[in-house]
Image (cartoon, rainbow, N blue to C red):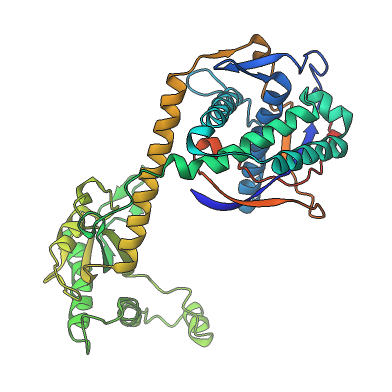
Amino acid sequence: MKSVKTKIACGVLAISMLAGGMTGCGKLDGTKTAITINDEEISLGEASFMLRYQQGSTYSYYSQFYSMYGMEMPTELYDAVNDDGTTNGDSTKAQALETIEKLVLMRQHASEYGVIITDEEAEQAKEAAEAFVEKNGQEVMDKLYASADDIQDAILLYLYQARMYDPMIADVDTEVSDAVAQQSTISYVKVSTAGTETDEDGNTIELTDEEKAEKKEIAQRFLDKLNAAEDPATAEFSELRKELNDELNEENKSTEDTEESEASEEDDSSSDSVVYLTYSSSTFSTGSEAEEEDTGLDEKLEEAARGLTSDGEIYDGIVEGEDAYYVVRMDLVYDEDATQSEKDSIVSDRQSDAFNDLLDQWLEGSDIKVASNWDELKVTDMDIYTITVDSASSDSTTEDAATEDDTAEDDASAEDASTDSTGEE
């Protein structure tokens, strides 16, 4: 659950239609019922808008993700076929349908939790819906099969969603003991024994026993350096690692007088330095649920670390892992900050589980009918919807809480719409 400002305005749905993107436009009646939930009818127009809003949110997320990493969007996003024969578009549509059902159910149960929408808020939603219609134009509205009333009701559903989370999880136990959540933090260095060369068939050549012994000696030298430090319990692993790594590079530096080595010495570059050992810090659970956690640590390293019971205690010896030698120290048996973070995470999981379980109970106990016109709405790569923000828009806001559950994928947040409709060839 996260705190947000819920915009009482609809939003930011921009439609970019590829070739054939207008297929089917005008063939469906948006006033007809698409979904009936316990005798409450949701029109095709409203259902279509909510589907496209969720579709647009998904597309915008992936667009930003790929852009962030300098990659191009895949040529097939919604049309990609899954192992079960369905497409990603089918999955997106199924998720949108479940979202709509849950949003309506939250409104139907709102009175049980004292949740209301004021007349003023309903009027704000109406104004926002009218602004959406005006800014997007009739072509977009025809494609959505939606009216201003459909948009307004969708906005109100999102607002109910934001208001319902806290009261729905109010009875969740928020007490978590240290015994359950305790986190410990260790520092360790790793000297890899994994082979780095391959044979003519591409198979990794394992290190010889002699080579492994040399690796173990490096780990031992680090342990000796650590124990010789002014205060081994607090000595910086990163500094000691660098110090030893520099020593090893100096010792193993080639004595051949080549132009390459001379150039390296002249510019004092360390780009050719070998990394003999690496440093890491790791925090893991040592509470009562620790056995259920996958720490990602080497099994032998984790076993050694769990045997350290006091702050600053150093494991007496070299830990021989699956493909490395380790030196490990227990920095904090009880890491207060990490433990509090784990408590918050446990409570958040409890709340999310309680929220989803209650929604699932409501779904199971409801009479839900989906009309055939819902099947006519398709989510494909020929019909792309994206989200944009009109930075110049004004908004009316109320402070609410929104859940990170899948029903909040669309997020209750939305601003006055600035929507473009373009045909791309």
**10 vs 222, nearest the viewer:** 10
Q: Nearer the viewer, residue 272 or 317?
A: 317
Vertical placement of residue 188 versus 47, above or below:
below
Q: Position of residue 265 (x, y in %)?
A: 48, 85
Looking at the picture, tell me which residue is in the foreground, 105 or 410: 105
Residue 387, image quadrant: top right
Residue name at image x 52 percent, y 24 percent: 82
Q: In the rendered image, is residue 11 in sight?
A: no
Compared with 396, 114 (above or below) is: above
Q: Residue at x 50, y 80 (%)?
A: 269
The image shows residue 366 at horizontal and vertical percentages of: 48, 18
Locate residue 205 relative to residue 379 in the image: left or right.
left
Residue at left offset 59%, top offset 52%? 4
Residue 267 screen position, x and y as percent: 54, 85
In this rendering, the answer to whether 373 lies above or below 302 is above
- Would residue 319 be seen by someone viewing this image from the given angle? yes
**Image quarter in which the C terminus is found:** top right
| Left or right: 164, with 171 as reference point | right
Which image quadrant for residue 378? top right
Q: How many marks?
A: 0
**Measuring 51% from the left and 30% from the top, which residue is drawn there?**
109
Asked if residue 53 lies left or right of residue 14, the reply is left
Outermost bottom residue: 230
Q: Dividing the picture into quarters, in which one does residue 241 lie?
A: bottom left
Q: Is residue 222 left or right of residue 2?
A: left
Q: Position of residue 71 (x, y in %)?
A: 64, 47
